[in-house]
Amino acid sequence: MSIRLVDIQGKLAEAGLKATQQRLVIYKALHDSRQHLSAEQLYRIILPDHPTISLGTVYKTLDTFVEKGLIRRVPCEDGTLRFDARMDMHHHIFCEDTGEIMDWDDAELNALLAEYLKKKQLPGLEVVGVQLQITARRQASKPDTEA
Ligand SMILES: [Zn+2]
């Protein structure tokens, strides 16, 4: 489902950011993609409808969004940096074959992690978040006997 402009305006205002056209366009494109995109991928999606937005602006705007807690960075196994507009607790599966990142919601895993971290004290540190990235590849398909 695509996000309404008024909702993005609300998020920007809450974060203390002015709702410029570029910010609205960039946030909406990332949110509505439902994917974890790099700045370059996002730029390529935006470009056809908004040819005046530069790649530099996309980078800068994404950094601002991260600083303000509107989106988060997702460093990837393949060395690329992706961005995620979903801020609730969830984990990621990185597919080695496609380079795609999929969301992984698992209440049982969240409960296990919370329980574990409650018992395990990290010296001098306070846990403020946990996010797993599971690296996976497609299983070799079984011989296709039905075709
Ligand atoms: Zn995600």
Image (tube, rainbow, N blue to C red):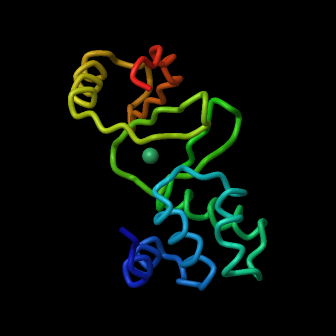
Residue 132 relative to residue 73: left or right: left
Which quadrant would the N terminus be assigned to in this image?
A: bottom left
Q: Residue at x 48, y 76 (%)?
A: 16
Q: Residue at x 70, y 76 (%)?
A: 48
Q: Residue at x 43, y 82 (%)?
A: 5
Number of numbered discs visible in the structure rendering: 0
Residue 76 relative to residue 115: left or right: right
Q: Position of residue 115 (x, y in %)?
A: 22, 22
Res 97 → quadrant? top right
Vertical placement of 105 versus 35: above or below? above
Q: Residue at x 50, y 52 (%)?
A: 35
Vertical placement of 49 versus 115: above or below? below
Which quadrant would the C terminus be assigned to in this image?
A: top left
Q: Position of residue 12 (x, y in %)?
A: 47, 75
Residue 25 relative to residue 15: left or right: right
The residue lying furthest to the front in this view is: 147
Vertical placement of 30 versus 113: above or below? below
Vertical placement of 75 versus 142: above or below? below
The front one of 97 and 122 is: 97
Residue 121 relative to residue 17: left or right: left
Q: Position of residue 70 (x, y in %)?
A: 47, 62
The front one of 25 and 49 is: 49
The front one of 67 and 78 is: 78
